[in-house]
Image (spheres, rainbow, N blue to C red):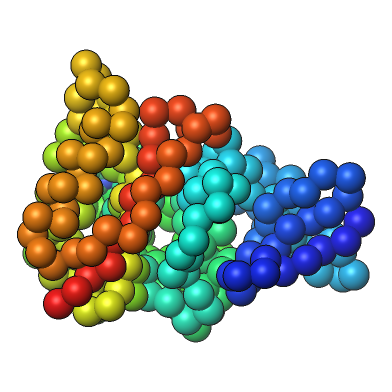
Amino acid sequence: MRVKEDQKFKNIFWILDGKKQLATKNLVPGHRVYDEVVRQVKGVEYRIWNPYRSKLAAALYKGMGVFPFKKGSKVLYLGIASGTTASHVSDIIENDGVIFGVEIAHRVMRDLLSVASVRKNIIPILESARRPQSYSWIVPEVDVVYEDVAQPDQAKILIKNSDIYLKKGGYSLIAVKSSSIDVTLPPKKVYRMVEKEITSTRRYKLIETIDLAPYDPKHAMIIFKKLR
Ligand SMILES: C[S@@+](CC[C@H](N)C(=O)[O-])C[C@H]1O[C@@H](n2cnc3c(N)ncnc32)[C@H](O)[C@@H]1O
């Protein structure tokens, strides 16, 4: 078994053992977050990052060209749920970075609290992402806003939060579930609507739209850069 760091993105690894699997280096060796597979290579523990469980992993498998999460990044994560994807982001940003994780549902927040008790770079916030002012006492300016809330007004939620918290030149990523926005329209049409809604503010430039099929059919990851 061999490990190779991604050619473009630091702290993203590929485990090669006949097949090629995406992985992150476990920030808390010995601790698993969900039922992820763990691999030891030369004394280092890696967590396999499953594209069927995480839309961000699916976007990496689909060749995303910009990956703004780095060692030390400050991230506002809207719809963090129990921390499946966030735990891999936590590995990538290491302890120099921080994730402010907003989640509305009490039940998943309980699981997130146990993840955050060992991963000190995750700060759980039990709130609605529709009320970004309510967490202004704790969230500073961030490098990345990541949203995965599967709500009909998800573009508006992203704009509201990015307007307040994202630094100029920072990136907003939105995982779009087309059926949450309009179940009657073809997914591609829904993605164009979301792109238009966000770029028409003139504060965000579209960087790329990645269709997540076959990992997550009818979902896309859309990436924007904040212009001002
Ligand atoms: C698809 S799941 C997120 C999965 C997670 N991002 C992952 O990859 O591990 C969507 C989450 O968004 C949360 N959510 C929905 N509306 C929200 C809101 N207004 N504010 C915050 N969280 C919300 C849901 O409770 C749910 O946990």
The picture quadrant for ligand 1 comes to: top left
Is any atom of residue 217 visible in this view? yes
Out of 143 and 182, give the one closest to the viewer. 182
Is any atom of residue 26 visible in this view? no
In the rendered image, the vertical position of residue 204 relative to residue 36, given as above or below = below
The mark total stands at 0
Looking at the image, residue 198 sits to the left or right of residue 29; the answer is: left
Looking at the image, residue 161 sits to the left or right of residue 52; the answer is: left
The image quadrant where one finds the C terminus is bottom left
Task: Using the rendered view, name the quadrant where residue 219 is placed.
Answer: top left
Residue at the image point whose x is 63% and y is 65% from the top:
12
Residue at the image point whose x is 78% and y is 66% from the top:
4
Give the image location of residue 120, x and y in percent.
49, 71
Out of 174 and 122, give the one closest to the viewer. 174
Task: Using the rendered view, name the quadrant where residue 98 is placed.
Answer: bottom left
In the rendered image, the vertical position of residue 135 relative to residue 150, given as above or below = below
Out of 222 and 69, give the one closest to the viewer. 222
Residue at the image point whose x is 81% and y is 69% from the top:
44
Give the image location of residue 116, x and y in percent.
47, 61
List the single residue furthest toward the top. Answer: 184
Give the image location of residue 77, x and y in percent.
34, 58
Looking at the image, residue 217 sits to the left or right of residue 35; the answer is: left
The image quadrant where one finds the N terminus is bottom right
Give the image location of residue 117, x and y in percent.
50, 63
Residue at the image point whose x is 19% and y is 64% from the top:
204
